[in-house]
Image (cartoon, helix red, strand yellow):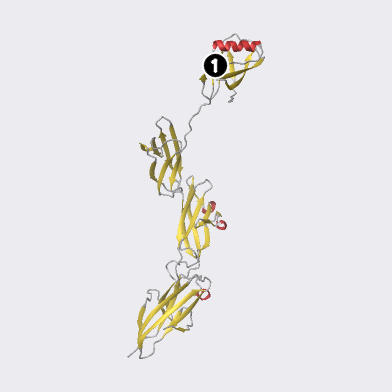
Amino acid sequence: MMKKILNFFINDVEREQWKSNLFIFRVEVRSDQRSFARFGGRRAENGVGKNFLLKIICDLKRIAIPRSLLSICTSKSSSIKHLVNLLRISFILFIILTPVTHAEFTGTINIDPPNPSTYQAVTATLQSFSFNVDNSLITWYLDNKLIVSEIGKKQISLTTKGIGQTTTIKVQAKMADGNVFEASMTLAPQSVDLSWEATEGYVPPFYEGKAMPGESSQIKVVAVPSFSSSGKPIAPENLSYEWFVDDGKLEDQSGRGKNVAFLNLDYLSNDNVIRVDVTSDDGSTAENTVTISPYKLDPIFYFNDPILGPDFSKAIEDRFETTKEFSLALVPYGLSSSNNIKDYSSFSWSLDGLPIDTPADNVLSLRPTDNSYGSKSLSVNIENTKRMLQKGVASLQIVFDTRN
């Protein structure tokens, strides 16, 4: 049984004849032998014979019930019976049998990518499971400007604006039966850049390039956000950061103001995908990823001047010729040594397969025998004493001729 309690308001034309003494009456409406609703009401003791208006206040649909289907039950009070009889004769009673069933249409505007940065191409798609989008007249607006209106036009492309500039997307779907669905959203693009460095990577003094990470090297990643709110920039320390490596969250590195993360490359992975999600207090978000791959240890030979040191202007590759004494320096690019080669590496030099000793680990000086010629094979095995996976080999063919 469905019940809905409503209020009956009785307004008499001659209000001065109404008294304060009120009686409670009950009206029960029946249809097809089912009781659908009961209504509590009040009426005045006097003024029953006067013209009055019965108002049923409700937000549901009103349905007229034929008098032949109505069975009205009241209390034993004769005055209330007189009122009910008057209602039967004077009015057509509109009663609710069922609530109004307004179809509620739902839909969403999906953005790809979900968190676009500034000046980025974006796709907006209308999606709904409550009405047929393909058969609806879809109208798109950007910043209240009509862009396109077409049946089944459920997707548009746009480009986000700069930091602090918003774009309002509005879509209207008019269905074949005349119903209309509307949705809107605002894009406030934020961005974050990532920079990284191999904190332990070895590079020679005055080297202008970037140190490359070796196997299991420690990496420092810095997030540089560009966020704004109400046209004002947000300081990096007032943002929250979540750091991930290969989708695994770095809990101890994440948190408010933590825009720097330190991590070691996974020695079991060829590529390490590092991601940061940045969130402001008002819910704006931005994300970025960087993929870092470990480099194999790459030792390279250079000519070494006893006074000036290595000549980094030209590397010595597979072979070189000489007629005099020479000195070579070996630079182990990719070695995790914090620029301290001696404490982090070992060098094993050999000439034609025979081991030779060197005063300095990465420097070798050789002098060909007078009045001689020929060739020698020089090789060096190098490994990191702290990171066992970092190993490398360098070899060189030396052709000499000291004959007069």
Image quadrant assignment for residue 146: top left
Residue at position x 66%, y 12% in the image = 77
Furthest residue in direction front, as rendered = 33
Residue closest to the eye, 347 or 227: 347
How many numbered marks does the figure carry? 1
Quick check: 251 above or below 304? above
x and y percentages locating residue 206 in the rendered image: 44, 71
Q: Going by the image, does 361 lie left or right of 375? A: right
Q: Is residue 7 visible?
A: yes
Is 328 located above or below residue 267 in the figure? below
180, above or below 313, in the image: above
Q: How many residues crowd around disc 1 within 10 Å: few (fewer than 14), some, or many (20 or more)?
A: few
Q: Residue at x 58, y 19 (%)?
A: 29
Q: Quadrant of the C terminus?
A: bottom left
Residue 384 position within the rendered picture, expressed as x and y whole percent measured from the top left: 50, 73
- Which residue is the site of mark 1? 69
> Which quadrant of the figure contains the N terminus?
top right
Which amino acid type corresponds to the residue marked 1 in the rendered image? Leu
